[in-house]
Image (cartoon, helix red, strand yellow):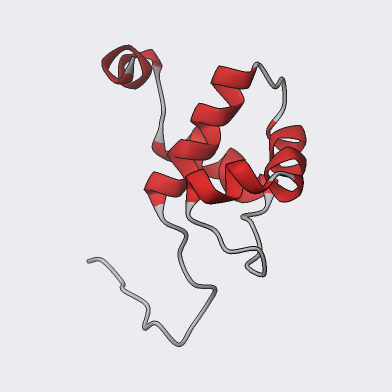
Amino acid sequence: MEVFYPYSIGRPTKDPIMLMKILLIQYLKGFRSVRFTCKQVKQHAMYRWFLGISPTEKIPNHSTISKFLSQRLQGVAFWEKFF
């Protein structure tokens, strides 16, 4: 039995495409950590534009991206198909 939570409980979800774009920035720019990538996204308007994040909107926390990477994008097969 699956349990679904109503939208009024918990934090709002982050767009998986945006999270993939953050990982793409990390890969293309050669950043070594998700934490450093988040700092760069926070500081540079070009990255915010690419991600579709307004200057007043908060970027996802590095732990959100790390969990997305480890829980949703598991294994080498995904990255081989992606690239």
Q: Position of residue 57 (x, y in %)?
A: 62, 67
Q: Position of residue 77 (x, y in %)?
A: 31, 15
Residue drawn at x 48%, y 55% as measured from the top left: 52
Q: Quadrant of residue 44?
A: top right
Residue 36, relative to residue 55: is it above or below? above
Residue drawn at x 41%, y 27% as measured from the top left: 74
Residue 70, relative to residue 11: is it above or below? above
Residue 45, relative to residue 32: is it above or below? below
Q: Observer-nearest residue: 12 or 27? A: 27
Residue drawn at x 41%, y 32% as measured from the top left: 73
Left/right of residue 40 with respect to residue 8 in the rendered view: right
Left/right of residue 6 with respect to residue 52 in the rendered view: left
Left/right of residue 41 with respect to residue 1 in the rendered view: right
Q: Position of residue 5 (x, y in %)?
A: 37, 78
The quadrant in which the C terminus is found is top left
Q: Quadrant of residue 6?
A: bottom left
